[in-house]
Image (tube, rainbow, N blue to C red):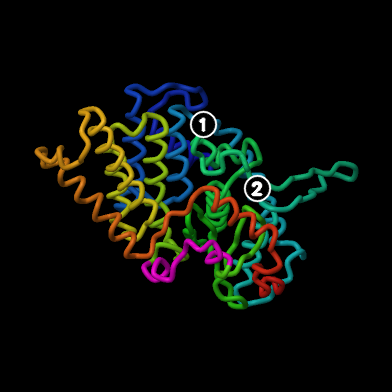
C-alpha cells in the first residue's frame, strides 16, 4: 500500500522529499497533473484505482504532499481490524457469498461501532467509530471537509468521505462495492444472495430501504428511470466522478472566474458516465457563473448582448440545454435545509426505513 501511494504522489508532485509540505508553482499545475493521472486511468493507460484517484484530488487541493506515514498507519489499522473481525465468529452469515458479505459487515462495524482489541492480558485498544460532521457537511465553506484525509484525522465525516472510505477498504479487500447517488448525497449499494441489493448508509449507521431515499420528495420516478439517482456506479464511473471532486476543489481554491478546467473535468467524466448528475450540474453552474460575471463586468442586463462572441453564445446554448434536459429527466433541486431534514428523518425514523432483511447478516 505504501509503495502505491508513494508512486502516486511522486507522479503528481515530482518531489524529492515526499514527507515535507511544499507549495507547487505555478499554483494550478498540480490540478492539471491530477487530471492527467485520473484520465490515464480512464483511458486504461494507468491501472484503475479508486483510492489513488481520490488521493490525487485531495493532494491537488492541498498543493503539497500528504502525511503518508500517518495515512498508511491508519489504513493498516483499519484493514487489520476489518480482517480480524471478518475472520472471527462475530458474523454468522452462511450464504455462498459469505466471503464477501462478512467483509462488508466487518467494514461497516469498524466504521460505525466501537471495536475493542486486546493488546495483552492487561491492555485493550479501543477503536471508536467515525461520526457525522454537522458543521459544513457539504463542504461549502471548507472543501477539505469532504476529504478522507480530514475524516481520518478528525474522526468526523460526511456522505462524501464516509462512503469513499468504505469503497476504498472494500477495494483493498478485493470485494465489489458500488457507490450510488441521491440528491446532494452518496451512499453504498451492495448485493448478497440472501437480501439481494441493499443500501448501506454510513452517516447514520443503518441499512435504509429505497423508500427512505424517495421520502425526500426530490427523487422522481423519471430521475430513477434515467439513471440520475439510485443507480450503481461502475468502478470506472466512480473514478470518473473523482474528476468532479477535482473540479470543485479547483473552484474552491481559485474561484469560478475561469470555467475551462472545470468544464474539461465534467466533459471527461460524462464520457464514461453520461447520466452523472454531479458532472451535469457542475458544468452548467460553471457556465452560468461565467456568463453572469461577464454581464456584470460589462454592465449588461441580458445574456443575448454577449452573443456577438460565438463562443459565449454556444456556451449559453449548451448551458440552457443541460438545464432543460435535466428537468425533463426528473431532476429537482434539493435545498440544503431540506437535505438536513432528510438525513435527520433516517435517524429519527430508523425503524420505519431500515431494511429488515439485514437482521439475517
Q: Position of residue 359 (x, y in %)?
A: 71, 72
Residue in front for this viewpoint, 141 or 102: 141
First in residue order: circle 1 vs circle 2 = 1
Q: Count residues near mark 2 (Cα–Cα under 10 Å), then give few for <14, some for 14-19, many for 20+.
A: some
Q: Position of residue 125 (x, y in %)?
A: 79, 43
Picture disc at residue 66: 1
Boundaries of the magenta span: 212-226
Picture disc at residue 318: none
Q: Position of residue 334 (x, y in %)?
A: 47, 54
> Residue 120's quadrant in the figure?
top right
Q: Is residue 156 magenta?
A: no
Q: Position of residue 161 (x, y in %)?
A: 55, 46
Residue in front for this viewpoint, 105 or 173: 105
Q: In the shown orientation, is residue 261 left or right of residue 11?
A: left
The residue located at (54%, 58%) in the rendering is: 187
The residue located at (49%, 50%) in the rendering is: 335
Q: Can residue 175 be seen here?
A: no
Picture disc at residue 78: 2
Residue in front for this viewpoint, 212 or 247: 212
The span from disc 1 to disc 2 (Cα, nearest Å) is: 18 Å
Amino acid at each position: 500500500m505504501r509503495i502505491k501511494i508513494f508512486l502516486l504522489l511522486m507522479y503528481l508532485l515530482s518531489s524529492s522529499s515526499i514527507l515535507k509540505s511544499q507549495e507547487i508553482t505555478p499554483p494550478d499545475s498540480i490540478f492539471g497533473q491530477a487530471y492527467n493521472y485520473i484520465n490515464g486511468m480512464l483511458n486504461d493507460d494507468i491501472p484503475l484505482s479508486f483510492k489513488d484517484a481520490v488521493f490525487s484530488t485531495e493532494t491537488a487541493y492541498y498543493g503539497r504532499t500528504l502525511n503518508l506515514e500517518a495515512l498508511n498507519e491508519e489504513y493498516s489499522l483499519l484493514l487489520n481490524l476489518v480482517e480480524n473481525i471478518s475472520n472471527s465468529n462475530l458474523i454468522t452469515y452462511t450464504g455462498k457469498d459469505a466471503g464477501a458479505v462478512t467483509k462488508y459487515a466487518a467494514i461497516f462495524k469498524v466504521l460505525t461501532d466501537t471495536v475493542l482489541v486486546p493488546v495483552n492480558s492487561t491492555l485493550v485498544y479501543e477503536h471508536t467509530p467515525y461520526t457525522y460532521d454537522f458543521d459544513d457537511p457539504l463542504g461549502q465553506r471548507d472543501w477539505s471537509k469532504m476529504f478522507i484525509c480530514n475524516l481520518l484525522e478528525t474522526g468526523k465525516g460526511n456522505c462524501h468521505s464516509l462512503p469513499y472510505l468504505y469503497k476504498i477498504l472494500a477495494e483493498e479487500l478485493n470485494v465489489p462495492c458500488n457507490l450510488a447517488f441521491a440528491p446532494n448525497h452518496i451512499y453504498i449499494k451492495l448485493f448478497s444472495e440472501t437480501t439481494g441489493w441493499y443500501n448501506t448508509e454510513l452517516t447514520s449507521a443503518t441499512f435504509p430501504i429505497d423508500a427512505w431515499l424517495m421520502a425526500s420528495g426530490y427523487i422522481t420516478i423519471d430521475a430513477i428511470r434515467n439513471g440520475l439517482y439510485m443507480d450503481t456506479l461502475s468502478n470506472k464511473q466512480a473514478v470518473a466522478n473523482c474528476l468532479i471532486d477535482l473540479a470543485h476543489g479547483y473552484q474552491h481554491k481559485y474561484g469560478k472566474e475561469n470555467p475551462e478546467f472545470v468544464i474539461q473535468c465534467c466533459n471527461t467524466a460524462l464520457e464514461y458516465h453520461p447520466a452523472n448528475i454531479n458532472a451535469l450540474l457542475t458544468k452548467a453552474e460553471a457556465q452560468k457563473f461565467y456568463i453572469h460575471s461577464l454581464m456584470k463586468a460589462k454592465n449588461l442586463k441580458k445574456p443575448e448582448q454577449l452573443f456577438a462572441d460565438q463562443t459565449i453564445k454556444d456556451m449559453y446554448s449548451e448551458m440552457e440545454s443541460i438545464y432543460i434536459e435535466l428537468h425533463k429527466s426528473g431532476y429537482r433541486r434539493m435545498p440544503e435545509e431540506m437535505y438536513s431534514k432528510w438525513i435527520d428523518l433516517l435517524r429519527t425514523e430508523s425503524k420505519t426505513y431500515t431494511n429488515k432483511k439485514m437482521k439475517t447478516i
